[in-house]
Image: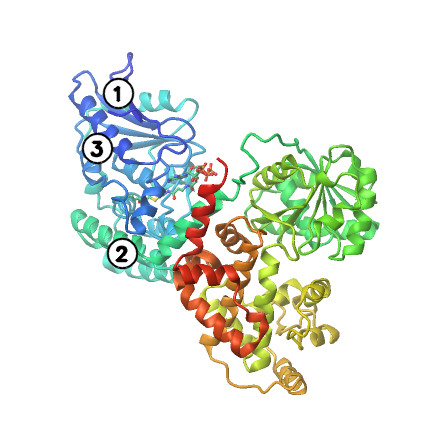
Amino acid sequence: MSGQVTLTTDANAPVAVIVIDNPPVNALGPEVVDGLSSAFDRAERDAAVRAIVVMGAGRTFIAGADIKELEQAAWGGGSGPPDIHDLLARIEDCPKPVIMALHGTPLGGGLELAMAGHYRVALKDTRMGQPEVNLGIIPGAEGTQRLTRLVGVEKAIDMCVSGKPIGAPEALAAGLVDRLINGDLREGAIVFARDVATGGIAHPKTRDRRDRLGTPESNAPIFAAGRDLARRTRRNMLAPLKVVDAIEAAATLPFPEGVRREKEIFFECLRSDQCKALVHAFFAERAVSKVPDVPKNTATTPVETVAIIGAGTMGGGIATACANAGLQVVLADVGREAVERGMAGIRRSYESSIKRGRLSKDEADRRIGLIREQVGYEGVASADLVIEAVFENLALKKEVFASLDTLAKPGCILATNTSTLDIDEIASMTKRPESVIGMHFFSPAHVMRLVEIVRGRATGVNVLATALALAKRLNKVGVAVRNGPGFVGNRMMFPYMYEAQFLVEDGATPEQVDRVLTEWGMAMGIFAVDDMGGLDVAWRVRQELHQFEEPGARKPVVADILVEMGRLGQKTGRGWYTYTEDRKPLPDPEVVALIERTAAAAGIARRPVGDEEIRERAIYALINEGARVLEDGIALRAADIDVIYLTGYGFPAYRGGPMFCADQIGLAKILDRVTAFHRDLGQRWAPAPLLARLAKEGSTFREYDAARDASAPA
Ligand code: 3H9
């Protein structure tokens, strides 16, 4: 046995209890596997033991294979996750009943191990599943074979394609769990073990079951629907389609052959770029909260009441996010009408959650009850933290901060939701610049996971730590960035958006650009995004950013005219597209005619623009600016930029984020194209010095991050 697995025998019951203790999540590393083998040796040999319970110490049963080992294997190093096929066979063949006692999040290899036991019991709040597709792989420890046998083809497809865990009551109904335990899990599992050990019954082996596997005729439409689900919901991804193949093998082949097929597919997926990208995204998301000069034990300000200034769409979304996290909220605006409109929007959003079955009416009412309406800003006096979400206009924000400074209590943190403006200038209006910080939420703020947390020159480390902790409490991903026009996300977004607009002026159409970008994997095309956000909003931001543009640089010529025409996007039913009642975008010949006219007037000779040019100009514009953002120190790591784009801008997770994707394409190739665009299209394409340097050294952004992390103080 190892230190990570212990075995004790319950004195009153002839039951051995094996406990896995490998914090933080009891990942299935080699020591755990060896420890389990030895523990089973002992428990089997001990004649006094009549049954064996396996459980996890701490917060969870095994939450899967160790993803660090998967990562090494994906990159061609290390021996990969331990091979547990022999262990699974010996558990299933154990002559004594094996009861898996589940709590927390038995996921991936953890659930696979549990399914090799003869029985599973679980605490009611346990959440279990096969999330491997989220890492670009499929279950590789017989999970596709056993899960299908336990819950049937349809449910197995649903769980493995979505990767979403299910709760214990659902698992009980599906046949994945045999009993729910109220109270103490260990005690409950021992009672269950005693019952089955004395029952004189044969203990079920999952691998021998065929009763839920269906027939080729009954399964054919289920597999077709499963593949359709994978294509629709996990666009362009390999693993979700491949997992259906593995489940089909479970339904059609004898168990050992099904396992062989699963193994082949597992390794095919493990070696894919998608797996590397998704594993990168997993660790990158967890690394963002580690900011070198903000140690883990930094004191934070307790936050129970948050005041939101500005009851518009953004303010309403932030208020909802705070109420969802159980915080007291003051929703303030200058006029009664604005506050009432904001509150009505919040109510509508909760009603829609009730309609979709996501929330009970009681729970929605409880959350709405946490939000207090306030006309004027006096209500901020009770707040521990204020989030200003008024119009994107520097003069207005400065005015608001001057008055917040006089009204908020000492120690209260003053955050601005600005998406582009200078935090230091805003902070300069207060006598507490150390308490001023940016918390840039993304719309809709109660849905989108990203919060860019912007440190000003004077922002205190404890204020930053508090903002990061608040983001976590709101179930969001907070990424610390430095102050600078547009911070990280929008600074990169503008060259990308401009380039898309130049592409249509040069000869493409909004529809073509959006099609190319969505086919490439972006959640939405950039013109659809602009229409959703509001062309007037982008216009306002452009006015603030013009001061940072190179004199004489090319500027888009069509967008301003659309704003003048009142084509503000979805909210006016017309923008780059025309919208149907149900907000479906339709290409608008009037817009194409306008583009042609405006381009001609500006002396631009339109020409056919190919899809490849669109892909390169749009994505490389993003990457080139990303390299500048990194070199300027606005982002701490390339991986932080990736997280920002994955969680806030609809960048496809299976490409790992713009900087990871750049590494995959090859920095030398990108530099080559950027240099050519610089020659042909002008100064805006000047290669970012960091991109040029890394490309010339044959290096990557990943190596750049690793070198910086290694030199950062521990
Ligand atoms: C698999 O099992 C393949 C098999 O089919 C076949 C094998 C042959 N490994 O998320 P948190 C770390 S694939 C290594 O902040 P939470 C994480 O990095 C795997 N490390 O906590 C973090 O470290 P740090 C299938 C892991 O409470 C710390 O734990 N399983 C692993 O919000 C806390 O994590 C999955 O995909 C791991 N497996 O959420 C499950 N898991 O503190 C992936 C976590 O240094 N994990 N860490 O930053 C999760 O979904 C969540 O972490 C979990 C906890 C729900 C478990």
Q: Amino acid at mark 2?
A: Glu
Mark 1 and mark 3: span between their CA atoms?
A: 14 Å
Q: Can residue 585 be seen?
A: no
Assign ligand 1 to one image quadrant: top left
> At label 3, which amino acid type do we have?
Ile
**x and y percentages locating residue 588 in the rendered image:** 61, 79
How far apart in space, not on screen, are marks 3 and 2 (Cα)?
27 Å
In this rendering, position of residue 334 left or right of residue 634 = right
SS label for mark 1:
strand
Cβ atoms under marks 2 and 1 closer than 8 Å: no
Secondary element at image label 2: helix
Give x and y (percent) for residue 587.
58, 77
Which residue, given by chain and number where applicable, does mark 3 sit on?
A: 91
Q: Earlier in the sequence, mark 1 or mark 3?
A: 1
| Residue at (37% x, 57% y) in the render | 274
Q: CA distance from mark 2 to mark 1?
A: 39 Å
User: Disc 2 marks which residue?
Assistant: 268
- Residue 16 is labelled as 1
Q: Residue at (56%, 79%) from the top-left corner?
A: 509
Q: Check disc 2: other Cα within 10 Å, few if <14, some if 14-19, many if 20+.
A: some
Q: Earlier in the sequence, mark 2 or mark 1?
A: 1
Question: Mark 3 or 2, which is nearer the eye?
Answer: 2
Q: Earlier in the sequence, mark 3 or mark 2?
A: 3
Q: Is residue 613 left or right of residue 47?
A: right
